[in-house]
């Protein structure tokens, strides 16, 4: 049966990587952030842009012919895929799926300390510093929404496992989604070469796949302090362990885990991260 996969995650949780991995599979095609088709943008901000064309959705060779009446039927027909991937991330941004297609939810999650390190790096780059306490607050709210949306079940992926055991996680996900798994694009590292006119996502990753720098603030050299340099590093799957060397972040996260609210405790447990006390032990700087 034709199936739409909804990828739910907080921004900066690895969804662009997961989107590219799924897009590399022969029976799947990615739409990227499908919600970009409908969302109004402030003047001068492009909708999309498309990963392949690098243009606004109105100029993309794929999306310009879109039939608004049934956009999923349009995309299934044009891509010949069995599974379409919508990486709009937030439950409130999802486009309703007609009854003729199945819909399945995929949750992609980082721990609060992994997530805080990424959010703070991006916000520092934009000159908008964010406290670790704010990150924990937002993490709790965003993951509460995702868990609420996925009460009927969903496929849970923890970011660390996606980066450390990519092939196993992707094989399990494909089996669950009902499509054949091809390990070749992961093993050869060619999964970055996008086939689909996927929309939006992490600008650094989109630009990597087409060797552009157009969406990165200040270009590749400036983006996250050159995190994506040298070029050989772009296409490697690496666990972002920047939290490990940030002692201030580790101390503050330890404190916040020890003071965890019942909501935070419940969400950590339901996402398979263990108890806040276990996480406090993992981030405590003087242990081990
Ligand atoms: Zn395009």
Image: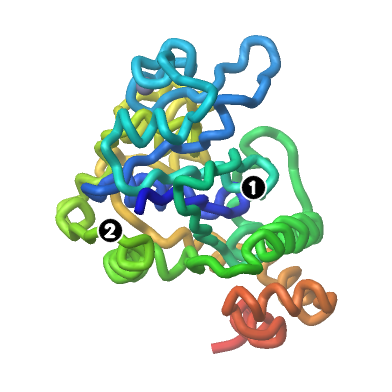
State the image coordinates of residue 252 (x, y, percent, origin top left).
Answer: 75, 69
Q: Is residue 251 left or right of residue 174?
A: right
Q: Is residue 144 left or right of residue 175?
A: right
Residue hosting label 1: 90
Along the viewing direction, whichever of 189 and 200 lies nearer the viewer: 200
Q: Residues within 10 Å of mark 2 (few under 14, many from 20)?
A: some
State the image coordinates of residue 2 (x, y, percent, origin top left).
Answer: 37, 49
In 3D space, how far apart are the residues under numbered discs 2 and 1 (Cα atoms)? 24 Å
Quarter of the view holding residue 55: top left
Picture layout, residue 185 above or below residue 192 = below
Residue hosting label 2: 179
Lower sequence index among marks 2 and 1: 1
Display colour scheme: rainbow
The C terminus: image quadrant: bottom right
Q: Is residue 97 left or right of residue 1?
A: right
Q: Residues within 10 Å of mark 1 (few under 14, many from 20)?
A: many
State the image coordinates of residue 98 (x, y, percent, origin top left).
Answer: 53, 42
Q: Is residue 116 left or right of residue 37?
A: right
Which residue shows up at 58% across the image and 33% down it?
35
Which residue shows up at 58% across the image and 63% down it?
114
């Amino acid at each position: 049966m034709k199936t739409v996969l909804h990828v739910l995650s907080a921004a900066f949780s690895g969804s662009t990587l997961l989107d590219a991995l799924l897009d590399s599979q022969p029976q799947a095609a990615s739409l990227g952030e499908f919600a970009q088709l409908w969302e109004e943008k402030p003047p001068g901000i492009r909708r999309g842009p498309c990963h392949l064309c690098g243009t606004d959705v109105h100029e993309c060779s794929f999306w310009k012919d879109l039939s608004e009446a049934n956009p999923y039927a349009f995309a299934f027909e044009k891509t010949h895929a069995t599974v379409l991937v919508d990486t709009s991330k937030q439950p409130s941004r999802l486009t309703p799926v007609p009854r003729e297609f199945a819909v399945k939810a995929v949750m992609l999650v980082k721990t609060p300390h992994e997530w805080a390190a990424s959010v703070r790096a991006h916000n520092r780059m934009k000159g908008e510093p964010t406290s670790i306490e704010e990150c924990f607050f937002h993490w709790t709210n965003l993951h509460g929404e995702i868990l609420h949306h996925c009460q009927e079940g969903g496929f849970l992926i923890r970011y660390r496992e996606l980066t450390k055991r990519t092939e196993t996680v992707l094989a399990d996900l494909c089996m669950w989604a009902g499509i054949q798994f091809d390990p070749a694009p992961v093993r050869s590292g060619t999964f970055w070469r996008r086939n689909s006119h996927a929309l939006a996502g992490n600008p650094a990753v989109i630009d990597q796949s087409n060797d552009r720098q157009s969406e990165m603030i200040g270009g590749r050299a400036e983006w996250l302090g050159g995190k994506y340099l040298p070029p050989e590093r772009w296409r490697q799957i690496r666990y972002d362990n920047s939290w490990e060397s940030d002692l201030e972040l580790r101390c503050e996260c330890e404190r916040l885990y020890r003071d965890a609210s019942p909501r935070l405790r419940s969400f950590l447990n339901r996402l398979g991260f263990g108890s806040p006390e276990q996480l406090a032990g993992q981030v405590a700087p003087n242990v081990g």
